[in-house]
Amino acid sequence: MNNCALKISSILRWNHNRSIIIDIKKIQSRIMSQTYQHSNYCNNHSINNSLNHDNKIINAIVVCGPSGSGKTTLLNLLFEHFKDKLKFSISHTTRKSRPNEVNGKSYYFVDRPTFEQMIANNEFVEYSQFSGNYYGTSIQELITNEKSGLLSVLDVDLRGVINLQKKDILKAKYIFVKPPSLQFLEMNLRNRGTENDDSISVRLKHAAEDLKQAETIHFDLILENFVLKNSFEKLRQFVQSELTRFNESHRHRE
């Protein structure tokens, strides 16, 4: 019996009168399986086609800095200043959402099997694990921003920076927000009022390691964030220059 006959016979059965009865459940199962496989193929095919567009280049600004460095404050000011020109890249994560977080705005909250399937499908430009949870930047998120004429801004840790700098598809500028001292960092963490002593100690330890490692990584701009006003002005000028370049290159593609 050939493969076709085997497949047909597997979804047919005989009743006591030897009449053929179609096994609907098996058909539905087969259809669902084929649909899932086709969906995965289409997702990968769509991403690959998008990456083949415009010489596989996605523009971005990548910002990195230890917790308490003032990075989030600077980013908020940046998005306020450059409305409708920049787009924050929303990451996927497997961690549980917090009370003030909104799915699709703060993060894309997914379960672990979904995230791992996305890894298998090569859907991330970078991903890492922190405190037992996955975090990743979706290629499709960046492609959507690019096609909308918006410059993507990514907020990643040092491991993310290292991974991104290995990617040929990304044309990025890298910014490191550096606290003037660990004492300054500790003061900022305590002023938040959300960290206990143990948590602050862990964050300071990680920050010290990050500051040392950052010296070995290429950054296009290093901001020592002591006076917020001055730091933001340097950041604004840098991003304005990148936006000018991005808009010119985007016009040439149209």
Image: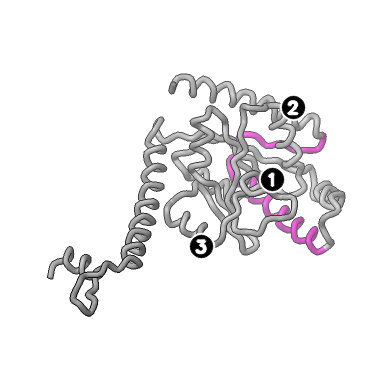
The reply to whether callout 3 and callout 2 are in contact (CB within 8 Å) is no
How packed mark 1 is, by other alpha carbons closer than 10 Å (few <14, some 14-19, many 20 or more), is many
Residue positioned 61% across, 60% down in the render: 133
Q: Residue at x 48, y 35 (%)?
A: 58
Spatial separation of the CA atoms under disc 1 and disc 2: 18 Å
Q: Secondary structure at mark 2?
A: helix
Nearest to N terminus: mark 3 or mark 2: 3
In screen coordinates, is 63 left or right of 99?
left
Crowding at dot 2, Cα within 10 Å, few <14 / some 14-19 / many 20+, comes out as few
Residue depicted at x 71% and y 27% = 81
Q: Which corner quadrant of the image does residue 96 belong to? A: bottom right
- Amino acid on which disc 3 is placed: Pro
Mark 3 lies on residue: 113
Q: Secondary structure at mark 1?
A: loop
Q: In this view, which residue lies farthest toward the left?
A: 1
Q: Which residue is mark 1?
A: 65
Q: Earlier in the sequence, mark 1 or mark 3?
A: 1
In front of the other: 241 or 97: 97
Q: CA distance from mark 1 to mark 3?
A: 29 Å
Give the amino acid type for the residue marked by disc 1 in the picture: Gly
| Disc with the residue nearer the chain's start (1 vs 2) | 1
Q: State the colouring used for the structure image.
A: one colour
Where are the magenta residues, as a range? 198-227
User: Disc 2 marks which amino acid?
Assistant: Glu
Q: What whole-number distance in Å separates the C-alpha atoms at marks 3 and 2?
A: 43 Å
Queried whether the magenta region covers residue 113, the answer comes back as no
The x, y position of residue 113, in whole percent, is: 51, 62
Residue 118, given in percent of the width and then of the height, sits at 47, 54
- Helix, strand or loop at label 3? It is helix
Which residue position is annotated with label 2? 233
